[in-house]
Amino acid sequence: MKEKSAERAHIPVTPPGADREGVPSRSPAPSRTGPLSPRDAGWDGDRPGGELWNRNFRLFFIARTAALFGDGMIPVALTAGLLGAGRPHSSVGFALAAWMGPLALFVLFGGVLADRFTPRRMMIIADALRLVGASVLAISFATGNPPLWAVYALSAVAGVGAALFQPGVASTVPRVALDVQRGNAVLRVSEALMTMAGPAFAGMLVGLASAGAVYAANASTFAVSGVCLFLLRLAPMPSDETHRGTFVAELVDGWREFRARSWLWGVIAIWTVYGFTVLGPMLPLTAVEVTEAHGSGTYGVMMAVNGAGSVVGGLLALRLRPRRPLAAGAIALTGVCLNLVVLGLGMPVFALGAGQFVSGAVFAFWLVMWSTTVQTHVPPEALNRLHAYDVAGSLLMLAAGRALAGPVADAVGAPEVLLAGAVINLLAVAVLLAARPIRRLERIG
């Protein structure tokens, strides 16, 4: 792979003179994403910060923030509604699985549909599906005790909606943000804040009203998201008019595009192992270890501290622009070891808080570096499908890691699993940095 890339201009992934890894030669290259001028993006040129906070980005930011706020309510609403109706504890897990399963299974199809019918259109359809599902659940819980099959079916509808929505996010950010990295960083900060605010608001609403009221609020967030996306005015791009083959041909073509970029499939291959052995077990084992040692209140505080760290990581990504973002993000991931070690050694609450804060910060920084790299190195006509492969693989391995964390911890001990995760974390970082296509990939823009 060629080692130099143009850092001041958007360039095509495979222009003449570039190899299949997506890194161009030293010669100048035209815009990768088409003619996206400030006017095309809706830039408010007379307002400070208009380069980022243009009209389209503001609308997209509100849409994402509202939807993330609503997503944070779902676990609380399901738990309160099902347990309050006298359902068994297992019903909560089955309902959440009914949401995540369709998301993992259908996200690849969502990527193809987004490429065929434009991401904006598919995201609006997804919000409409989720609005209907949440509204029916709100009415069902408010008026009585809905049958479990209905709860599972409507949760699955929400999962399908998320599968249709998620692939389009990756390709929309470069179209609404002139500075892609800053746009991703701002969205990451918003996600961290909504991850804390959504469950807190839902818990308060359950105490004041009912699970039905939470679902009603959840439905309203999807209505806000859909309206904001409908109001987007995106400049047309060549990829919107690209001739498409059959559905299966599009899936196959997406796989070819995926395999053609060793830095892309290399990171995702490493990430599947990382998600299964490190990230997957970390969340459930953190919940068990902290709750058993210090109580559920302390665990809630730890999650809030982790969210605060994510905010700081997003803010750092607003300021820092490493020349090689994947290498910088990989180095940052070494900070996750601190969290795993302090948990595994059963250290005091202050140390646990420090570990959660650092883990949240470095993980958010990595996610901004990764998202920005994918969005600026992958051509628009394939971005939705390739992002869908990323999401599908990550979700499946995370789910498997979480499911097996308990049995493995029972067999060998939770501290041993956490400390082994710290070692695997360092090995994963070492592999990321050892892989030349990943380590040498340079920032675009």
Image (cartoon, rainbow, N blue to C red):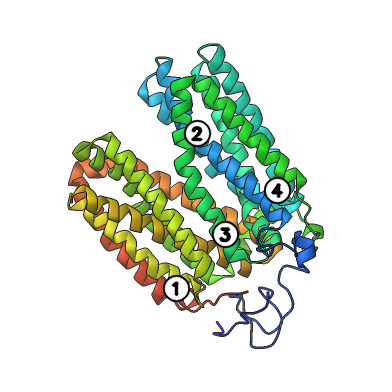
Q: In front: mark 2 or mark 4? A: 2
The image shows residue 56, relative to residue 365, as above or below, that is above
The mark nearer the N terminus, 1 or 3, is: 3
Which residue is the extreme one toward the bottom? 26
The mark nearer the N terminus, 1 or 2, is: 2
Q: Disc 2 marks which amino acid?
A: Met
Q: How far apart are marks 1 and 4 (CA)?
A: 32 Å
Q: Distance between the residues labelled 2 and 3?
A: 23 Å
At a point 18% along the width and 47% down the height, the residue shown is 412
Q: Disc 3 marks which amino acid?
A: Asn
The residue where tag 3 is placed is 184
Image coordinates for residue 30, horizontal then vertical, percent: 74, 78
**Circles 2 and 4: CB atoms closer than 8 Å:** no
> Visible in this render: residue 20?
yes
Q: Disc 1 marks which amino acid?
A: Ala
Which residue is the extreme one toward the top? 144
The mark nearer the N terminus, 2 or 3, is: 2
The residue where tag 4 is placed is 113
The mark nearer the N terminus, 1 or 4, is: 4
177 to the left or right of 280: right
Which disc number belongs to residue 327?
Answer: 1
**Circles 4 and 3: CB atoms closer than 8 Å:** no
Q: Is mark 4 on a helix, strand or loop?
A: helix
**Circles 2 and 3: CB atoms closer than 8 Å:** no
Q: Distance between the residues labelled 1 and 3?
A: 18 Å
Image coordinates for residue 46, horizontal then vertical, percent: 75, 64
The residue where tag 2 is placed is 73
125 to the left or right of 404: right
The image shows residue 338, relative to residue 223, as above or below, that is below
